Image: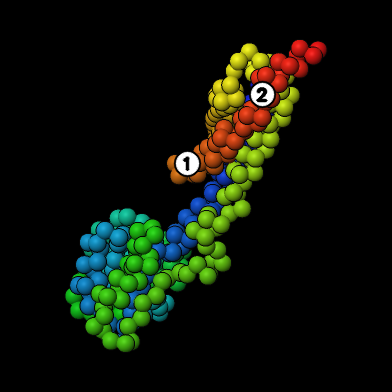
Amino acid sequence: MARVVVIGMLVAGMIGTLTWTELTVTNDILAFHRGYIAAGGNVVVASHPQGLPAARCLALVARSEVVAAGTANPAPASDTNIAPGTFFQVQEVSAGALRVWGAEPGVEAALAGGLVMGSAAAAELGLGDGQYVAIEDDSPVVVKVVDLEGRSPQFQRSIFKPAAPLGRFATCWIETADGSVAGGEILLTDTFADSGEELSVNRWIRLGEFARNPIAELAGRAQAHVWLAVGAVITLLVWLDLWFRRGSLSLYRVLGTSRTGLLYAAQLETAVIVVVAGVLGYMWAAAVYGAVALASPTEEQYLVAARAGLSAILVPIIIGPLPALLTGARNGLLNQLKER
């Protein structure tokens, strides 16, 4: 029983360590990926000196791979009735463009009934949500303040007014679903293919600016093959255990157990020990990691860690019991006993 407990504790510790490592590495990669997406990693913009048809751009939101789509057109700078002589950049936009730039839900209704203002411009004027302001000698309208610092800081000191979904606009912006940004570039290129050679389609942010590629990191992480080393170590433990038990295995052979029977028995015993210990080690590491690291791993992260642990314990289950086949022949063992 003592040997079973020792082996079980060692296996649980190794599988727990492997699980913790996988959760830590994948959590770091996913945190970077979330930051990249939040900064606009899935945003694509098309532009043309003569403008692009607004209707085509706005229609793209109906596609399943497009999260938001909108148009934008720079307008002449303007001052406000609150601070005459202090000019701000003005943009004629559709609500979809503001969503692409990082505005929170609800900006659609605000743009339809008034003006939207970047938080830097609002702070400069001392304005907040629900207050009134006028530009271009128009009547005062209610304003909504949006914070675009995370994705579009260059628009923080801008005032946005609604644009009719007609005519041509300088830029068309779309945000694609995760993993579809390359398709978004193709989509915009095809949508405005008749615009001529001056059409420009670009990603808002490229991975080169972040100097990391989360997909490549996940596939090429050093921990991707650690399960093999863990499995090899556990296998060595099983072989060492069988070596110290070679006397009892020989006794089974003397009593008539075949080599195949010994192999099955050793394999069943190994499977029970490493599976139970592995599951306990995995559950312990997963639970403690979530509490200590103050992280909330996703289901995919748990699956990655579980797959690594399962791969590790399959190695000793498959090849660990093989030394049982090397137990001496029954007749030879009987002759040795007779000589003694």
Q: Is residue 298 visible?
A: no
Residue 248 picture location, percent across and down:
69, 17
Picture quadrant where residue 314 is located: top right
- Depth check: 340 or 228 in front? 340
Residue placed at 38% from the left, 67% from the top? 182
Residue that numbered label 1 is attached to: 303
CA gap, disc 2 and disc 1: 45 Å
Residue 189 picture location, percent across and down:
30, 76
| Image height of 218 relative to 184, above or below | above
Residue placed at 54% from the left, 49% from the top? 26
- Depth check: 150 or 137 in front? 150
Q: Amino acid at mark 2?
A: Ala
Marked residue nearer the N-terminal end (2 or 1): 1
- Depth check: 217 or 312 in front? 312
Picture quadrant where residue 181 is located: bottom left
Is the image coloured rainbow, by chain, by secondary structure, or in one colour? rainbow
Residue that numbered label 2 is attached to: 329
Residue placed at 39% from the left, 75% from the top? 202
Q: Amino acid at mark 1?
A: Leu
| Image height of 340 relative to 288, above or below | above
The residue lying furthest to the right in this view is: 340
Residue placed at 71% from the left, 15% from the top? 334
Quick one: quadrant of the C terminus?
top right
Structural crowding at the residue carrying mark 2, measured as other residues with C-alpha within 10 Å and reported as few (<14), some (14–19) or many (≥20)? some
